[in-house]
Image: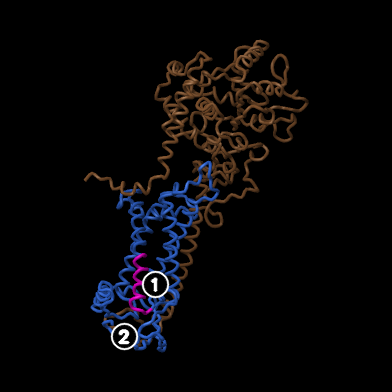
Amino acid sequence: MTLDTPTYSKHSTKTGQVEAYQRVQRVTTTWRIIHWVQALSVVVCFITGLFIAKPFIQTSSIYSALPFPIMGWSRALHFYGAMILDTSMILIAYLYLFSRSHRDITDLRPTPEHRSAFKEAALNFITFNRRRRFDTTKRDPLLAVMFVLLHLLLLLQALTGLQLYVANFSDNLSSVGSWWPQFLHFTTDWTATVFGGNVGVRMTHLTASWLIIAWAVFHIYYEIWRTIMWREGDVGIMFSGSKYVRVKDDANGS
Amino acid sequence: MDLDRRSLFSGALRHRGSQQNESEQLALKQKYQERLKEVEAMEPLSGLSLPALLVEHRLSRRNFMMWASAMTAALMLPPVFEKQVAEAATLLNRVPVIWIEGQDCAGNSEAFIRSAGPTVEELLFQTISLEYHETLMAAAGFQSELRKQTAAQMYKGKYVLVVEGAIPQGENGAYCTIGAAGQTFYEEVQQLSAGAALVIGAGACAYYGGIPKAYPNPTNAVGVSSVVSGTPVINIPACPMNPINFVGTLIHYILTGAAPALDSTGRPIWAFGNLIHNNCERRAHFDAGEYVQQWGDLGAQNNFCLYKMGCKGPFTYNNCSIVRYNEGTNWPIGVGHGCIGCSQPEFWDTLAYERPMVSANIHAPGLAGLGIESGADKFGLGLLAVVGVGIVAHAIASAVGGREKVSTMASSSSSEAASGGTTEKKEGE
């Protein structure tokens, strides 16, 4: 992370004390690009998925035939979004394990510091910011665990989604060769066994999508909450890559 | 607790206006019932009744009810009308029909009578009071001519005139003369349509002239609508017309006493309102970007979309992708040949060739018109290749350049970091 020279805000507290803020670089540009690409893909997949699951617009009615194939484009966009999510997940899985700078997998090690920071981050949220005892210049282990959960959900979506996708292919034929449907069958057919056939896989896919959306809602809420409660501009992390920390911070809050 | 949890949401999910639809249906049903009573009071003309014929030909009640429900669906009526459709079918013997034929191949008549066993349509064709039909009647010459004139006088203003074939106008209609008196078909259509309650143009030739009208149209042939004036004309095109659409139109006539809603070229919307393409069994392959590229190729063997082989399903309005032909056995696209658009105006000159239409602006959904699955697969594979190359490059760089030591994790001691002590620089991953 990079800490700039202290910049002082003009904002003063009730007691008239001037607060000093320092800029902290939290994530890289690559990281932010991947974040927004994935976020956009999730949104596209969710919106198109809603229509695919319940196509509420009748496009081939004789009196109001729409020339635009809504279902066709919904499916196309759903698949593009899924392809982007799946490949970017391969990329970040690689960086998670083999990044040249920080390997995020190490964040999950249950060291005493990590456990303590995890507990403090959780307590901070539960006590509505009354207890502030962890370092906000770095990612906290609570966040790390939350993102692992999200990516497990996305992995489940990828596996169940590709299983539903390959069910479309006739006789293992695809435009990129027969290896592709065969590969999909090989890697995802077990989901049909586990979840109970195509219907079970579909229900799992739909349920997981709502869990992901619930996760995203909480994520946005939490980031905004932290931005307002800590007054350190946490939301900025995914826009500018940096946030601010108070130079003279009372650890117990005030 | 005996609670269906879905009922919690049923209020929100229920189709709006369903209450209104139900009352509309009830009113329509009432109207049909009154009309059926009126028709029933009329004297049967043919002396044949459908129930008796069904028994005679060993078609079970179940067969008939299956047919009735299929017909109700084809007419786009809700299932509650099934009983009335069945009743209307038994009342078809009240309708006098005069069937005349001009420039054509008699294919529309053949479509009715050339079935493996007697179908309900064929039996209905028997029960209608067919006063005159050149191909089927026993009488010939002056005798048949007399029959036609007698029927036209007897049922003046009440009979249904079915015109099969195109009407040549060149040389004062001399290209097609009918009967011993040598009357031109053009005159015959004009005379008989004047006294008809309804004119039905059967088949592609009666619709827009069909093949007789194809370039260079030596006989100056036209369709029925161009000749008849003053009497409503319902066109039932296709080559041949589907018997279901003909019988359906008659049943609609029995139920309502009026012509069904027609499109701008006089075709019933219930039968010709949808593109074949929209209900095609191979549509999923079109959307997926899977096409037959050559006769007998892998795509042809797997029933892929025939669009690139010149299928005109995307330009043709008809219901044959749903009701099919020959008792629902099959239809052209089902047996592996593209649609030639035979229910469209002037199809022979504009649609009936085995190439895609040059000016057609039709693309499968998906980027670059690649199709849904096909496009997604190529896109995904490309993306995977890019990511793969990136990962390999990164791995090589890591092997050569080694790692940087940075820590971005938070610890529970906040004061140290917050004081601005750490200034490690984090490079791009």
Check disc 1 and report the residue beneath it.
A95
In the image, B32: left or right of B230? left
Chain in blue colour:
A
The chain letter for the residue carrying disc 1 is: A
Query: Looking at the rendering, which quadrant does residue B422 occupy?
Result: bottom left
Q: Earlier in the sequence, mark 1 or mark 2?
A: 1
Q: Is residue A222 magenta?
A: yes
Q: Is residue B332 left or right of residue B226?
A: left
Image quadrant of residue A226? bottom left
Secondary structure under tag 2 reads: loop
**To which quarter of the image does residue A89 belong?**
bottom left
The answer to whether dots 1 and 2 both sit on one chain is: yes
Point out residue B165 in the picture as x, y percentages from the top left corner.
65, 27
Residue B319 visible to the viewer: yes
Chain assigned brown: B
Would you place residue A143 above or below residue B339 in this image? below
Tell me, yes or no, whether the two marked residues, 1 and 2, touch with CB atoms within 8 Å: no
* Rendered position, B342 above or below A59: above
Q: Nearer the viewer, residue B2 or B49?
A: B2
The residue tagged with tag 1: helix, strand or loop? Answer: helix
Q: Indicate which disc residue A251 carries.
A: none
**Residue B229 horizontal/vertical position (percent):** 67, 28
* On-image quarter of the C terminus of chain B: bottom left
B343 and B43: which is toward the camera = B43
The segment highlighted magenta reads A216-232
Which amino acid, mark 2? Asp
Q: Is residue A175 magenta?
A: no
Q: Which residue is mark 2?
A: A249
